[in-house]
Amino acid sequence: MTGNSPRVLILTHCFPASSSDIPGNFIYDLCVELQKAGARTEVITQKMDCEYDEEYLNNCGAVLNYFNWRGGSERFSDLKKFSLPAILGYISLIRQGRKEFRRVAEDFKPDILLNCWAVPAGMWSYLQKPRGCVSAVWALGSDISVYGSKKIFRSFIKKILSYQDVLFSNSIHLQKKITDLFNLSSGMLFTSRNMPQTDQEYERSSVLKLLFVGRLEKIKGPDILIDAIILSGIKNFNLRIIGDGEMKQELISTVRSNGLENRIEFMGMKDAGEISYHLKISDYLVISSRKESMPVVFWEAMQMSTPVIATDTGDIAYYCDKYNVGRICRAEPGSLAELLQFVSGLRDLRKILSDNTSKLNKIFSMASSADTVISLKEKL
């Protein structure tokens, strides 16, 4: 390490290819904040079969190292788990990732190594950490809830976590789970990307304006939200859905069969600027997940002063209750329908909740996460 300019090497299978790419978008902003703080940063990730926005990537402040693998356009979590192509993809991702890590680490000589997340990034650096380097794993829900909860994987995940000098999670809920499963403690890094500010002002109207941002997959509960709207009987509403996924056609079919095409709009993928705009003009962001640790979009909503309606998963209830920035319900359509009816009938509530969002923005940011990463140099 030279002076106050630590070398930070980030390993991740989720790094955005463009500003509209959702997976790992907060890691992009972490790179930006690390550069602002004076760190030299490099990233190792796999090459995807997709269109890359070179201008966007050049502005992240990090050197990006891509390696080839057999997965093509499928993200690690999207591979069909028991198919032969998926198995070959898994093997390729681990082998090529470990090979690329050795190459970059030897040349870059990192002071700080950040594995995002335990699987598969933690497997790339396992048992080959460079000398004089402090290593950390940033564990998210998929690592712990999916792999750590299965006995067949648990001992191996514990080996990966125990190999690291430092552990991080992104939620209080996940910190407790890491302790319960592995008897290990973890610090906190917040998964909040920096949202572009917009000149657009929120305007109250007679229409209840709702927004959903996320993958259209079962775990994120977009079907819970649409079923809840139907059950609620609310007529004067508008719902915009930003995101894509395997449930899209099923959801479109439900919307059409209930004659809601004019009030529920599927907008596809959007970049950060467009998401900022839609958050700003909405009455509420709806997070209808079946299971969650701490969704990135929650922090994005706080930056836009947009309160949330959310199912009671992960840390969302903790922040909504402590800072009064949203309302919570059970993760099922009937409960969410009742909450939608409540906020629709109490329109003054929106301003009260919105005014409280600034408290959270002062405490939690990607800049604070970057400072935490850089502070790891003190362990050298």
Image (cartoon, rainbow, N blue to C red):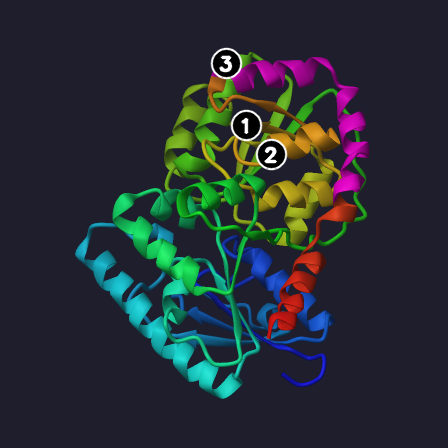
Q: Is the C-beta separation of discs 1 and 3 under 8 Å?
A: no
- Helix, strand or loop for disc 2: helix
Residue type marked 1: Asp
Residue nearest the observer in this picture, 170 or 70: 170
- Above or below 40: residue 366: above
Residue matched to label 2 = 316
Q: Is residue 359 magenta?
A: yes
Q: Is residue 32 left or right of residue 204?
A: left
First in sequence: mark 2 vs mark 3: 3
Question: The C terminus lies in which quarter of the figure?
Answer: bottom right
Residue type for callout 3: Leu
Is residue 117 depicted above or below 56 in this figure?
A: above
- Where 203 sits versus 372, above or below? above
Residue 234, percent across and down?
Answer: 60, 14
State the residue position of label 1.
312
Whether residue 76 is visible to the viewer of this picture, yes or no, is no
Read off the magenta span. 334-360
